[in-house]
Amino acid sequence: MLDRNLLPARYPRQLKDHFNRLSDELQLARGFAADRATWEARRPLVRQALIDAVGGFPERTPLQAEIVGTLERDGYSIEKLVYQSRPGFYVTGAVYRPHIDHPVPAIFCPHGHYAEGRFNAELQRRMVNHARRGYLALVIDKVGYNDRLAQDHSTRAPLLAGLATQGLQLWDNMRGIDYLLSRPEALSDRLGCTGVSGGGNQTMYLSALDERITASAPVCSVELGECYMHKRYCTCELVPGLRRFADLVDICGLIAPRALLLVHGILDFGFLIDSARKAYARIRQIYGALGVPERVAHYTSLDSHAYNREMREAVYDWFDLHLKGQAGPPAVEVEATVESPEDLRCLPQGLPGDAVNLLDLLAERAAGLHLAPACPPHRRAQLRHVLGGDPPPTPLRPHLAAAAGEHLGETAAQVELGYVYSEPDVVLPLALYRPAGEACCEVVIRFGPNGHGDVPEEAVAADLAAGRAVLLADLRGTGETRAEGDPSTAEWQAYLSSVTLGRPIQAMRAWDLRRLVDYCETRADLTAIHLAAHGTLLEGLVALLAAALDPRVASLTVAQLPPTFCGQASFGELATVGQLAVIPNLLQVGDVATLLELVAPRPVTVAQWVNLLGEPLASGA
């Protein structure tokens, strides 16, 4: 009875359309820099905002670098390297050293999401060719890959304390460059950087922030930032709030006037060529404004998402030109021995006993926040800021019409069906049940993971029997506005897009609840307003955020809630509740207990305390 259609037609594109609109508005307000004065004014702002977004960087500490093994090959050596980018955070990799007795240019090569990481055969061929062509080249394992598996690559948990995995990777890479340029074989003023896909994104961000890089070549990576509204990607590529301060054009602009070669596959399914070409055209405007249009170029190959031989040879030529001053003849890749993972591994017994992982870094960062006491209004202001701020309230435009009366349990109910607008392009399907004959009553706003259809009929019947009205709702991206396909995949996409926009989906849905409170207040027949969340800890968190920010909520009831975001052994996989509950910088305001304090002294009922995997806890918070 409760699971009925409330909209004239389902609207599965709502979140996509909404994210597009927000992204476009941010870009239109900022524009693209096309002249020198505009870019020089914007450049330092973009640079600092990027550093802040990834969590900043720690002080440089001793690398404790050690070569733990060497493989001698024809014309080059492979040295297995271990260093600590920060105390206890071990980085492993390999230095490919040419058999040359004089200093040579250096190349740093971050890798992407190859299943084999730096052991990938194609990547090995590239590294060998760099060395055979007379470069000192370094490749390191990404966080949580190969020798570093125990560090955990995919968890978003450090974002809670403002630490992005992209920032961790950047620091690992910067410290790798510290080591690489400390070698006597390296020419410190001639450094290249290249990688593909996730490694291409690392190349882009690293080259933007580390000006020691002379020439860079991100492969299958750079496009317009708006495209990140439409794709799923790993946590390591997520930069919170990026669309608020920059497009990827601006990030690449930070590389100017240093040499930049963009490389793309024309058939790439992940980084579309039309977007890549538009991005290149705008990046070229920045280089032209700075008077160095010859230092940026675009190379395309009739291939998909790859770093094929043709692309590699184009990058060899680019580095020869900008690191050696050699303009030809065109490079020809030589055959290379592909080593076994066992031979390339640095730590076959695993990380040392004093090694730390991403959750350890979260705990360390959270412990250093030292929250000062604050009165509720100030703490609410802090929370609104962390959640990306409130959008301007817009007309609710209610479209509700009376339906035939119904009986739920023993109680007759008057029913209204329809929708309201939370934002100009966000509609919330609603069903309002009121006890028949009651002129004025309290109301409970109820919702679940898939909107109004997840609310148990017995809960509605109990409210009506007690003389309370019930407002059932689909929050944005749920119920009749949920994207088509697998729900967990849709939630993952919504999470990534919203965090990139600087306003997490949990905050957006909490805003929807607050707009429903606005709607209830417009009605003379509804008095005290209560919230009730059915489903998982995600719905519990959304309701808690709404009640913490809105003193008009008289009471809060949730099915699940975690007692804390700290001390958790696992946050699960990318699309699970623990990962989707991560709100960047939330611990700068406080933990779950702080949110509950903002609701107090209003009553809060938690049916089940759970950990961040949604598993019941034996005792309460």
Image: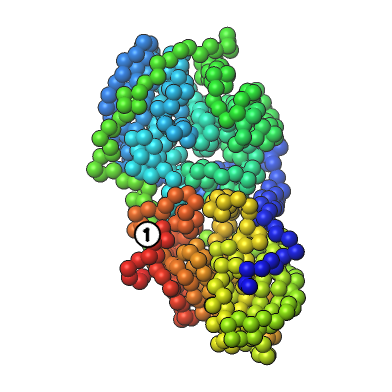
Residue 176, x across and y down, in percent: 39, 32
Front residue of this view, candidates 258 and 337? 337
Residue at point 37%, 53% (across, down)? 570
Callout 1 crowding tier (Cα within 10 Å): few <14, some 14–19, many ≥20? some
Q: Quadrant of the C terminus?
A: bottom left
Q: In the image, 345: left or right of 456?
A: left
Residue 575, visible in the rendered structure: yes
Residue 346 on image: x %, y %: 30, 30
- Against 274, residue 6 (above or below) is below
The residue sitting at 64% across, 86% down in the picture is: 412
The residue under label 1 is which amino acid type?
Cys
Q: Is residue 384 visible?
A: no
* Image quadrant where one finds the N terminus: bottom right
Is residue 261 found left or right of 557 in the rendered image? right
Say what secondary structure mark 1 lies in. loop
Q: Is residue 618 above or below residue 361?
A: below
Task: Name the image quarter holding residue 83.
Answer: top left
Q: Quadrant of residue 502?
A: bottom right
Residue receiving disc 1:
566
Tally the marks. 1
Placement of 392 over or under 496, stated as above or below: below
Residue appearing at x 35%, y 71% in the figure: 620
Q: Is residue 62 above or below residue 356?
A: above
